[in-house]
Image (tube, rainbow, N blue to C red):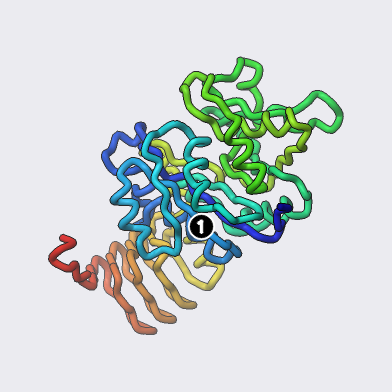
Amino acid sequence: MKADTNSWASIILAAGMGTRMRSEIPKVMHPLLGRPLIGYVLGPLKNLDMALKVVVIGHGSELVRDYLARQQVELVTQEQQLGTGHAVLCAKAVLKGFCGNVLILCGDTPLLREGTLASFMRAHERSGRSISILTAYLKDPGGYGRILRSASDRAEVQGIVEERDATEAERSLTEVNTGIYAIDSEFLFDALDSIGCENAQGEYYLTDIVGIAVSRGIPVGAISNAAEDEVWGVNSRMDLARAADIMLDRIRKGWMEAGVTFELYRSVYIEPGVMLSRDVTIGPHVVLKGGTRVGEGAELGAFSYLEGVKVPPGTRVPPFSKLIVPVHIPPGQR
């Protein structure tokens, strides 16, 4: 059956343990500005037309399952951690009967913008290809799989090599695989049945389907429309801190463009669920959390802490104020 190029499903890979986090908490559940990493990955999909959204879970699955219970997603469990290719294969039964494009995302890339994903999907549809990869050029590509291209004038994509399996020359390449793919569903699962695990990790790499496509004469598209700060994955506490810096900068700049004044903007902590009105003035070292709402013309004094509160228009909150709306937790969930 020919795929419907305008029909989309998504698979989010969220089964990894995240050993470098040194934690019993699943990597995708580590909080970034008050929200689990996977919450940021799911966010952009709300405005993209998806017939089906599948999340592959594994390590610490109960915690992830509880968080996703209120989301409109299908959950699939990867019982054994046998690699990204095996993780996608776990979703095959859920996607039975679906015919279209599959968008594959990583659950630990919280900085990817909705516009970048939408542009990537449109470019894949226009190309008519069976497989497209979202790539990026990084100043320091360490830790990422490298895109291998032919030496011809057209520089076609020939494959992806993981860094641990790469030669010294391949490691010098700066175009990297972001782990985000758009793939025709029929080709995807047919190719996954052909991959092996002859590599340094003994895992089934999703990246191997690129080599399979090339061997079958199927052209592979590489779409490089992602900015460097969008594709960084979170694999350690340092990565988490870097992601928080980037996200905070985006949020604060967004509010300044909307008419908010920050007296010392780099010192303000503000979570993505906070809503500010025009002509709000925020003093140094203010913390804004949860669903805080601040009305037009309000002033928040230095070092004030607000969590889940509503500040009426024109209000002046004195410095060092601490305003918190208690959150009721049912006894069975404490």
Please tell me how crowded label 1 is: few (under 14), some (14-19), or many (20+) other residues with Cα within 10 Å. many
Q: Amino acid at mark 1?
A: Lys
Residue lying at the far bottom of the rendered structure: 313
- Between residue 193 and residue 226, name the one nearer to us: 193
Of 83 and 117, nearer the camera is 83
Question: Dividing the picture into quarters, in which one does residue 19 lie?
Answer: top left
Label 1 secondary element: strand
- Give the residue at x 27% y 68%: 319
- Is 196 left, or right, of 236 in this rendering? right
Q: Quadrant of residue 138?
A: top right
Residue under numbered circle 1: 53
Pinpoint residue 40: horizontal percent, then vertical percent: 46, 55
Q: Residue furthest top?
A: 168
Q: What residue occupies the far left of the structure in this picture? A: 331
304 left or right, relative to 18: left
Number of dots carrying numbers: 1
In the image, what residue occupies the spot 26% across and 39% down? 24
